[in-house]
Image: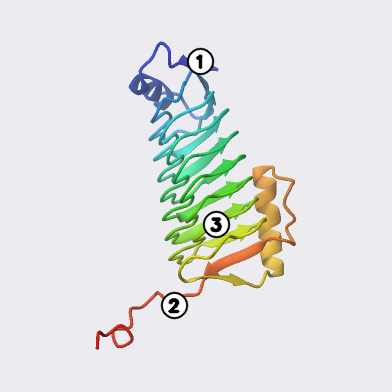
Amino acid sequence: MVTLSCADLSTREVNAALAALPDGGHAVVTEPRGRHNLAVGLTNEITVDIAGNAGYFIGGLCDGPDVTVDGFVGWSIGENLMRGTIRVRGDASECAGASSHGGTIVIEGDASLRAGISLKGGTVLIGGDAGNMAGFMAQAGTMLIGGDAGDGLGDSLYEAVIYVGGRIASLGADARVEELTADDVTAVKELLALAGFDHVDPLGVTRVASARELYHFDSVAHRVP
């Protein structure tokens, strides 16, 4: 195992050392103190433990590693994640999982505004509450919110599906509640097992998906008199 201290190394030096590790390697990043851009752009299958609170864009643009943050994170955790797993053992600020194409992002606490914005195939699992506009313009992938969801959930949703264990303040444009099927229950059980959550009833979640009324612009309906 390699230890990389942010007190001694720049962000570029930390990321270069992580990128140089062989598949199967393990690194601990110490004293992050809110440092931005840690563990970004990694394509090796390694394990990275960040021992403390971290800043913006942690684990962004990655394709393979498993990253765990033992604390809170700032904006855009796992932005454009392609493959791998990112786990936050605390709360996440805005835009968690933005434009994630693949992989899994687990937030054990709450997520702020616009979690899962423009999701493109990734999986975002939130143990607590999610702020307003979660799943905004999510195009593909899956979200699970173990707690409550704020206003505008799933606004302009495309083919992504959102499961909510708690209350929904309001739905966004073109989002609707759909009947929960046996396949959904099975999927939720698998997501809960993946995240390690045991506080959500798979039979009691609400499924939110697109009403598909915004797929095509109706020029007649929107013609100005």
The numbered mark at residue 213 is: 2
Image location of residue 46, percent across then percent down: 51, 30
Query: Could you tell which of marks 3 and 2 lies nearer the N-terminus?
Result: 3
SS of the residue under disc 2:
loop
User: In the picture, which quadrant includes the N terminus?
Assistant: top right
> Which amino acid, by three-letter code, is at mark 1?
Thr
SS of the residue under disc 1:
strand
Image location of residue 173, percent across then percent down: 45, 69
Which residue occupies 52% across, 39% down? 92
Residue at image mark 1: 3
> Which amino acid, by three-letter code, is at mark 2?
Glu
SS of the residue under disc 3:
strand
Q: Can you tell which of label 3 and label 1 is closer to the viewer? A: 3
Image location of residue 94, percent across then percent down: 45, 44
- The Cα atoms of the two marked residues, 2 and 1, are separated by 52 Å
> Which amino acid, by three-letter code, is at mark 3?
Thr
Q: Depth check: give the residue in front, 56 or 105.
A: 56
Which residue occupies 45% across, 33% down? 44
Mark 2 crowdedness (10 Å alpha carbons): few <14, some 14-19, many ≥20: few
Q: How is the image coloured?
A: rainbow
Residue at image mark 3: 142
Q: Can you tell which of label 2 and label 1 is closer to the viewer? A: 2
- The Cα atoms of the two marked residues, 3 and 1, are separated by 34 Å
Mark 1 crowdedness (10 Å alpha carbons): few <14, some 14-19, many ≥20: some
Query: Could you tell which of marks 2 and 1 lies nearer the N-terminus?
Result: 1
Residue projecting furthest to the top: 8
Image location of residue 126, percent across then percent down: 59, 47
Is 105 rendered above or below residue 136?
above
User: In the picture, which quadrant includes the C terminus?
Assistant: bottom left
**Image quarter for residue 178?**
bottom right
Residue projecting furthest to the left: 225
